[in-house]
Amino acid sequence: MPNILLQNATIVTLNDSDDILTEASLAISDDRIAAIGETPADFRPDEVIDLSGKIVTPGLYNAHTHAAMVFSRGYAEDMPLDRWFNEGVWKLESALTPEMVRWGVRLAMIEMIRGGVIGFADHYFYMDEVAQAVIESGMRANLAWAVFGHEGGEVGVTVPETVDFVRRYSGAANGRLRAMFGPHSPYLCSDEFLARTAAVAVREGIGIHIHAAETAGQVEASLAEYDMTPIELLHDRGLFETHTIVAHAIHSNPIDIAILASSDVNVAHCPSTHLRYAMGVTPVPEMLAEGVNVALGTDGAGSSVAYNLWREMRLAVVMQRQARNDPEALGGLTPLRMAARNGARALNFRESGVLAPGYQADLIVIDAAQPHYQPVHSVAAALVWSTEPADVQDVMVAGRWLMRDRRLLTLNEAEILERFDEALAEMMAKPLAQFKKYEVDESGSEIDHKF
Amino acid sequence: MPNILLQNATIVTLNDSDDILTEASLAISDDRIAAIGETPADFRPDEVIDLSGKIVTPGLYNAHTHAAMVFSRGYAEDMPLDRWFNEGVWKLESALTPEMVRWGVRLAMIEMIRGGVIGFADHYFYMDEVAQAVIESGMRANLAWAVFGHEGGEVGVTVPETVDFVRRYSGAANGRLRAMFGPHSPYLCSDEFLARTAAVAVREGIGIHIHAAETAGQVEASLAEYDMTPIELLHDRGLFETHTIVAHAIHSNPIDIAILASSDVNVAHCPSTHLRYAMGVTPVPEMLAEGVNVALGTDGAGSSVAYNLWREMRLAVVMQRQARNDPEALGGLTPLRMAARNGARALNFRESGVLAPGYQADLIVIDAAQPHYQPVHSVAAALVWSTEPADVQDVMVAGRWLMRDRRLLTLNEAEILERFDEALAEMMAKPLAQFKKYEVDESGSEIDHKF
C-alpha cells in the first residue's frame, strides 16, 4: 500500500494525555501510523492530502449490535420491552433467512461506515454470512453466534457448530475479524450451559459476548434463583476468565461494578435502546471511576432505529446529567473516548483506538469546516455536540480507505439496497409466528424465560 | 410565482387526524397549497417534481433561540449554569457588536435552513440586524429585542426604542416577520416593568417572548418575593393577556400548567439546553394533556451547540421516558407535531404547520431513500428517529424554495462564513469584561439578580 501523508489537520489522538494537535501531520506507512505531529525527513509519501479545517480522530466502534436487524427498523415502537419482543422482534425473526442476514448486515455496514464506525461487535444468527461481509467490507469485527444453550431449539446452528464457526474465523482477514462465543444471557441460558461455555472459552482462548442485567426484573429473578446478581452469576460461572463483552449491565450495583473492574470486563452501553424502552440508567460514571472499560453500542436497529455512534455519545452524556442533576458528568472528550478508544479495547483491537506511531492506521476525517461547526472554540464540543454521521468525510481501516469524500470504496450501495429489498420482501411474505416467548408478570419480572 | 406540482411523495400532513398520504401529489399555487392527495384536473403546473422515496412534512420552527449566539458555540461547556453565565456568555457578550449579530444570525440561518427549520422565535440584541437578515433569507420569524427593564443599562437599546422596533417590523416581509416584546424574565425584570410591558402589549396587540421557571431556585426566589410562582406572577401581571411565548417553564406545577393552558400560552421546550446543564425535566406530557401548546426550541448555541430540531425532538422523548420510566411517552408523530405544527402556532403563523389546501406552502422534503432509512416500516419512526439535518433535501417557505438539493438559494454561504470570522476576530480582540452578574447561593437560589 502507498505511503500517505495527511497534512494541516486538527488531530485528536485519544492518547493518555488526550493530546489535540493543530496544523499537524500524520504519516501512514502500509497499515500503520508511521509518525504524528511532525513528519520525519525520510518519509516519502506517495500521496499528500491537505486536511485544513478537518478533524482527524480514531475510528469509532459499535461495541454491541445485531447489525442485520436493520430489517426491524421502526417495526415495534413506543411499547414496553416484553411487547417489543413478542409482537415485534421475535415475530419477525421467526421468518429470518440467511439472505436477510447477508444483505441486512451489508446495509448496516453502509450506515456504519458512512457514520465513522470502523468496527462492530455483532451478536446474531447465520454468522458465516456476517463474516463474509466483514471480510469484503474492510471493517473490523467481533462476531458471536447467538446461542440459547438448549439443544434442538437453535436458529440454524447447534452449539458444536458455533465452536466450528469460531475456529473457522478467528483471526481472519489479517486479524480484522475475531470470532467469539455468544451465549445469549443469564436469563435465557442455563447456568450449567454458561459454565460449560466459559470452560471451553478459557481453554481455547476465545472471547465471550453476552447480554446481562437489562432490567430490574432480571436482577430480581437472578437473586431469587441463584442468590446472585446476573453479574455475580457470570463471574461465579467463569465467564469473566476470558475476554468478555457484557452488553447493557444497566442494573449494576457497587459490588457488580467492582467485579466488572477487577475482572477486566468490557461493558457495552447502549443509550438509545436503554432510553427509548425506559430500561434504566447505567451507572457509567461510577464504572469509569472504578476502571471498568465502558464502550458504546447501538444494539439492533429494532430497538435503536439508527446505527449512529455520535447520537449514542450525546445520549450517554445527557442521561447521566439528567439522572444525577450534574452538568459536569461525562464532559469533554469522554464520550468520544468511550466510542473509539474504549471500543477498540472492548473488541480486543489493542493497536486501534489511539492515534500514535506504531498503532494501526484506523482513523476518520470530520469536515469541521462546515457552517454548523463555526466557530470551533472547543474541538471536544465540536466533535461530541456538532457531529452527525454525514459530517464524516473519510474512513480508513489498517491504512485502507473504506470511504473517501463520502463515497464508499468497498461496498456497492445500489446493489445492496436492491438485494436487501428482495430479501425483506421474501421474509415479510412468510407467515410470522411467535418465535420465542418472553413475558413479564405485573411486577415487571420476567417469567417463563427458560422456554 | 410558478405553479408547482410535487408527485409520488409520502406526505405527512400533521392535520387533525395525522393523515399520512403515500404516492401522493401536492399542488402549489403562488404562496399556498392548492391541493393535496389528488391533483385537480384544471391545475396547470409550470414545474413537476418527482419525489419518489421522499417524505414531505411541514417545515420546522425553532420556538426559542438567540440565533446570533453561534459565536458562543462550545465556549462554556460542562459547567453549572451560574458559571456558564458568568464565565461564558456574559463575558463574551460584553464585547458584542452589531456586526457580530449581523453575521452570526446569518450563519445560524444557514444551519437552520439546512436542517429543515423555516422559522424561528429570536430573543436577542441589535434586532434590526436580525430583521434585515430574516427579510433577505426568506425565513419566517418572531423577533423580540431583549430588555431587562432598568433604564440606562441596556445593550444598545432603550425600552422606548424596542417599541419603535416592534412598530417598524410588525408584519414586514409579507407577514413573514413578526416583532414582539422581549422582557428577559421575571428574575431579571421588576414586576412593575413586566406589568407595564403587558399593558402596552395588550393595547397595541403585540406579542411577548419571555424566559421563565428555568431553575428550581428561580421558583423559590419568586415564591419568597411574590408568594407566586414565576408563571403565576406573569399571569397576575397581565403578560398572558396577549400572544405569549414562555421559554423553558421547566419547573411548572399543576396550577402553573392550568394557567398556561387556560391562558393559551405557548411553551418553548429546549431539551438540549435543559439536559446539558441539568436544569430539570419539564412536565411536557402533562402540559400536552392539559392542552398547552408546547413547541421545541434550541435556545442559543452557547447552551445547545447545535440548531438541530431533529435532535431536540428525540431528546424531548428520551428525557420523558427516562424520567417517568415510560417507554410509550411522546410516541409516534408527537415530537414532529411539536416541532412543526405547535411551532407554527407558537410563532402565531396560523396558516403554517399543516399541509392542507389553503395553508401556506411551507414544507420540507426529506430524502428517505438513503440507506440509513431502510426499510421504512413506520414513517413516524423514520422521521423522528432516522432524520438528521443533512437528510433535508429541499426547503420551501410561502411557495419559494430556500434550498433545493442541499443548495441554499437565498444566502451566500461563503461570504457569510468569511464575514462571520472577521466579526468574531474583532469581538474576541476586545477586552472581555464581566458584563452581568448572576450568582447562586449554596442552596441553588439566585442572588443579586436585580443588578
Image (tube, coloured by chain):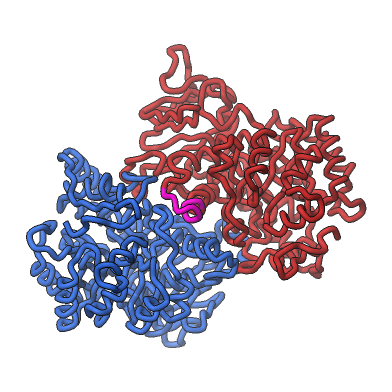
Chain colours: A red, B blue
Q: Is A352 covered by the magenta stretch? A: no
Relative to residue B376, is residue A232 drawn left or right?
Answer: right
Is residue A217 or residue B128 the one in the foreground?
A217
Residue B243 lies left or right of residue A234; in this view the side is left
The residue under the point 37% across, 85% down is: B358
Name the quarter where the N terminus of chain B is drawn.
bottom left
Of residues B48 and A131, which is closer to you in this image? A131
Q: Residue furthest right?
A: A152
| A378 on left or right of A416 | left
Rendered location of residue A203, percent (x, y): 84, 30
Quarter of image, res B77: top left
Classify A236 as above or below B165.
above
**What secondary structure prevails in the magenta region?**
helix
Q: Is residue A50 visible in this depiction of the protein?
A: no
**Highlighted range, magenta:** A320-327
Q: Residue furthest top?
A: A42
Query: Quadrant of the image for the C terminus of chain B?
Result: bottom left
